[in-house]
Amino acid sequence: MKIKELTARWMRLLFRLAGRFLIAVVLFFYVSVGATAAISLYKKYIYRAQDIDTINTIIVDSVDNKNLLPVTAWLNARPLAETDKLVDMITTKTGALESGTFFEIFRRQLKLGRPEEALFWLQLGRYRLRYDIIRCKAGPESTKLFDNMLNLRPSPAIETLLKKHPEMLKKALQRVLDFD
């Protein structure tokens, strides 16, 4: 009888400790996700508060640090109404930018209802991504893999544009080559 009581007591203690550990893990996860979201919102607020000309400094600093993600994050935080001015400002600096920046401009152009411009930026982003893959000597399989990944979630607006005007793809690709 004494052994059964002792075993039951240890089992309750074990379940209680496991439950507390599980609660602590869930609480830690909850706080981590909340803190990450709060930091993202704060950065977005800071980026929006900055003058639009700050993009030049962000690009220079990002290129120097070899981390171009802040450029894309800064663009993402800005209002859609600034898209044309931002495109004009970064067009001369596109040689130093990464494909994510071009995909962000693609997304903005789609939201503005400009599928032809969006198609150009999409193709420019793909072109830069392919160049980066080749430059890293990742091999032809990597290029195919990235193409397949990009095709997993096609844009209905781009698909509609290309169905109506199949020649637009060729024009966009030529424009990308001329631009580069």
Image (cartoon, rainbow, N blue to C red):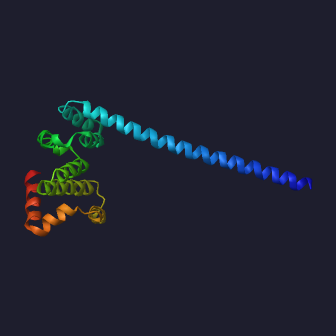
The quadrant in which the N terminus is found is bottom right
Is 116 placed above or below 39 here? below
Residue name at image x 21 percent, y 40 percent: 79
Question: Is 80 on the left-hand or right-hand side of 43?
Answer: left
Q: Position of residue 99 (x, y in %)?
A: 23, 51
Please tell me which residue lies in front, 147 or 12: 12
42 to the left or right of 78 = right
**Image x and y of residue 174, in percent:** 8, 59
Image coords of residue 156 (percent x, y): 21, 63
Q: Nearer the viewer, residue 54 or 17?
A: 17
**Residue found at x 54% / y 42%:** 28
Q: Is residue 32 above or below residue 127?
A: above
Residue plotted at (13% across, 69% down):
163
Number of marks in picture? 0
Q: Position of residue 103 (x, y in %)?
A: 23, 52
Residue in the picture at 7% in, 61% down? 171
Quadrant for residue 149, please give it: bottom left
The image shows residue 91, relative to residue 111, as above or below, that is: above
Closest to the observer, 75 or 172: 75
Seen as rendered, the residue at the extreme right is 1
Write down the quadrant of residue 24 in the picture. Answer: top right
Q: Is residue 15 left or right of residue 1?
A: left
